[in-house]
């Protein structure tokens, strides 16, 4: 008889192992068997839970999006006013729980897979729309006309671009530097 809670534990282990394997080998070279081995479960169990490598990647993306959403909500709950909400979203994007090498590798895999995998593309679109919508809502209290949407799209592009740009960087992620660069962009939008 299976122990209560083992399925959730095994799913989490497989998702964590997916992130580790993508970082170590890249998504293209990762196999379900290798991911399952890292997670300490059978390859058959990984297929049973997720169906395919793409299914496992999408489940991993959902888990990372949930973590990012939680981080963002916690920071926004402490924000006083629209300008602080913008900063909270930026800070959440580069929080130590988010902006780390293995997660950066996983996000790159998501973007690459979105080209050919409809569900991955849908998940990325949901993430992007939510980020832009939340930013635009905050900017709307500070800017007029079309400028809130433009500033939101630019800020989102800066966040995503700095994440992807880290793939080429030497050394560990520099969250303070990334936050400062995005905040500088935001200040220029508000001053313009």
Image (tube, rainbow, N blue to C red):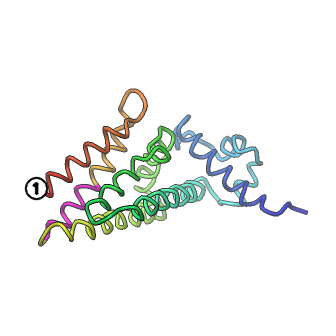
Residue under pointer 1: 191
Extreme residue in the right direction: 1
Residue 10 percent location from the top left of the image: 73, 54
Residue 30 percent location from the top left of the image: 59, 41
Label 1 SS: helix
Residue 182 percent location from the top left of the image: 26, 48
Name the residue: 39% across, 47% down: 94
Name the residue: 41% across, 27% down: 171
Establish if 88 lies above or below 176. Answer: below
User: Is 133 within the magenta?
Assistant: no
User: Which quadrant is the N terminus positioned in?
Assistant: bottom right
- When asked about the image quadrant of residue 7, the answer is bottom right
**In the image, is 44 to the left or to the right of 59?**
right
Name the residue: 59% across, 40% down: 21
Residue 60 percent location from the top left of the image: 56, 55
Label the magenta part by its dominant secondary structure: helix
Q: How many marks?
A: 1
**In the image, is 88 to the left or to the right of 138?**
right
Over which residues does the magenta segment extend?
146-156
Establish if 25 lies above or below 108. Answer: above
- Number of other residues with Cα within 10 Å of mark 1, as a class: few under 14, some 14 to 19, many 20 or more: few
- When asked about the image quadrant of residue 54, the answer is bottom right
Name the residue: 27% across, 70% down: 137
Extreme residue in the left direction: 192
Camera-nearest residue between 151 and 76: 76
Camera-nearest residue between 20 and 43: 20
Camera-nearest residue between 51 and 138: 138
**In the image, is 149 to the left or to the right of 122?**
left
Establish if 11 lies above or below 141. Answer: above
User: Which quadrant is the C terminus positioned in?
Assistant: bottom left
């Amino acid at each position: 008889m299976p122990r209560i809670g083992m399925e959730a534990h095994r799913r989490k282990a497989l998702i964590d192992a997916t992130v580790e394997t993508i970082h170590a080998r890249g998504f293209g070279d990762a196999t379900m068997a290798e991911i399952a081995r890292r997670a300490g479960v059978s390859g058959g169990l990984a297929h049973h839970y997720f169906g395919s490598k793409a299914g496992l990647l999408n489940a991993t993306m959902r888990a990372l999006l949930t973590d990012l959403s939680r981080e963002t909500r916690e920071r926004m709950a402490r924000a006083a006013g629209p300008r602080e909400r913008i900063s909270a979203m930026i800070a959440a994007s580069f929080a130590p729980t988010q902006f780390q090498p293995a997660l950066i590798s996983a996000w790159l895999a998501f973007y690459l897979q979105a080209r050919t995998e409809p569900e991955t593309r849908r998940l990325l679109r949901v993430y992007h729309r939510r980020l832009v919508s939340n930013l635009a809502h905050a900017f709307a209290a500070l800017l007029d006309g079309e400028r809130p949407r433009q500033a939101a799209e630019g800020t989102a592009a800066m966040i995503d671009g700095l994440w992807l740009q880290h793939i080429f960087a030497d050394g560990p992620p520099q969250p303070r530097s990334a936050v400062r660069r995005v905040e500088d962009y935001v200040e220029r939008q508000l001053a313009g």
